Amino acid sequence: MRIIRNFQIVLYNRLRRSVGYMDKKQSRMGDLRFFFFICLMITPILLSGCSHFNEEFKAKPSFEEANEFFNQGSYKASLSKYEQIIKKYPSTEDRVLFEMGVIHAHPKNEQKDYQKSLESFQKLIKDYPASGYRQDSEMMIFYITNVTIKEMLIAAQQKQIETLQQDVKSKGNEIVTLQNKNEGLEQKIFAFVLQKGSVDKILIEKKQRRLMLVSKGEVLKTYKIALGGNPHGPKERQGDNKTPEGTYSIDSRNENSRYHLSLHVSYPNERDKKRAKERGVSPGGDIMIHGIKNGFSWVGDYHTEVDWTKGCIAVTDEEIEEISNLAPNGTIVEIRP
């Protein structure tokens, strides 16, 4: 309020000086009328900004309380607290809608409701198009839609399995035997990979969206991947969201990455630098093989349904841990179109 008052005084003094040539009485009356008109126009705007700032500040303890309920697994209490925040601090609604959307879809929430989650994210996008939570909301809508579809398919398949199981009770022992053989085979394959020790190459085929661990020319294991949002063609400059193409190596790793764990790829190489220099642009950098963004690991391999990185190569959290164990620094990384 002191800032507003000072602004009014300064504005008034300037107006007085600007009309010095007018008759003293007329000048004073015109001055005052114009002054009060400007104050009426400007003051609500300034007060609105202060009000928004004050609401954000005042709401902080309430957000902390709601988050504490969430961390304790009290999802119903957390949602109730967020509903109170919207009523008391309406300017924070976009953040509240995002938080509530996450809670409604959280895997550990026994009363999760995907429909309510989608409604929260959709309302945020519609009512707050400029919100900083918009991009993550769009990403959540994509994942939840896919999860819902796949859960329906799984439920239908499960029903078919139950029907078939009733028809083949006499073959129950045979099914168990096959399952045990399958589990044993998976263990043997994994043991084989570990016995091979570190791999000498990571081969990435962009078109097929796959990453392969190679040792002495033999493919040990294959992973499905997601690429940069603009996947076609080699990376040419910083910010083009393209995944590079060429031969590089793993030159470092970050165990505290925002994407669970990351292996740094030695992009740009000399050819990349030369090409960028000829075009007068920066080649960019920070190309990684990494896991899923922290907080979204529950998405699992659904993340490969869309190319969502800024040029990196993404796998699941479990897969990046496995790759990291088998690919030391210095491992060749070949990225093909």
Image (spheres, helix red, strand yellow):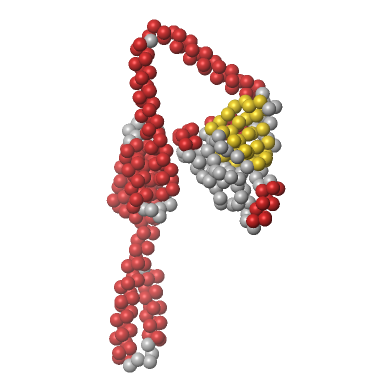
Q: Can you say whether 202 is above or below 17 in the image? A: above
Q: Can residue 257 be seen in this view?
A: no
Q: Can you say whether 297 is above or below 22 in the image? A: above
Q: Is 229 placed left or right of 156 in the picture? A: right
Foreground residue among 101 and 169:
169
Residue 165, picture quadrant: top left
Foreground residue among 309 and 317:
309
Residue 27, picture quadrant: bottom left
Q: Percent position (x, y) of residue 140?
A: 41, 41
Q: Which residue is drawn at 35% across and 67% down?
A: 45
Q: Which residue is drawn at 62% across and 30% down?
A: 213
Q: Percent position (x, y) of residue 302?
A: 46, 34
Q: Can residue 299 be seen in this view?
A: yes
Q: Percent position (x, y) of residue 156?
A: 35, 24
Q: Is 316 placed left or right of 133 in the picture? A: right
Image quadrant occupied by the N terminus: bottom left
Q: Percent position (x, y) of residue 253?
A: 63, 39
Query: In the rendered picture of this protein, how many numbered marks are placed on residues?
Result: 0
Image quadrant occupied by the C terminus: top right
Q: Residue at x 70, y 27 (%)?
A: 216
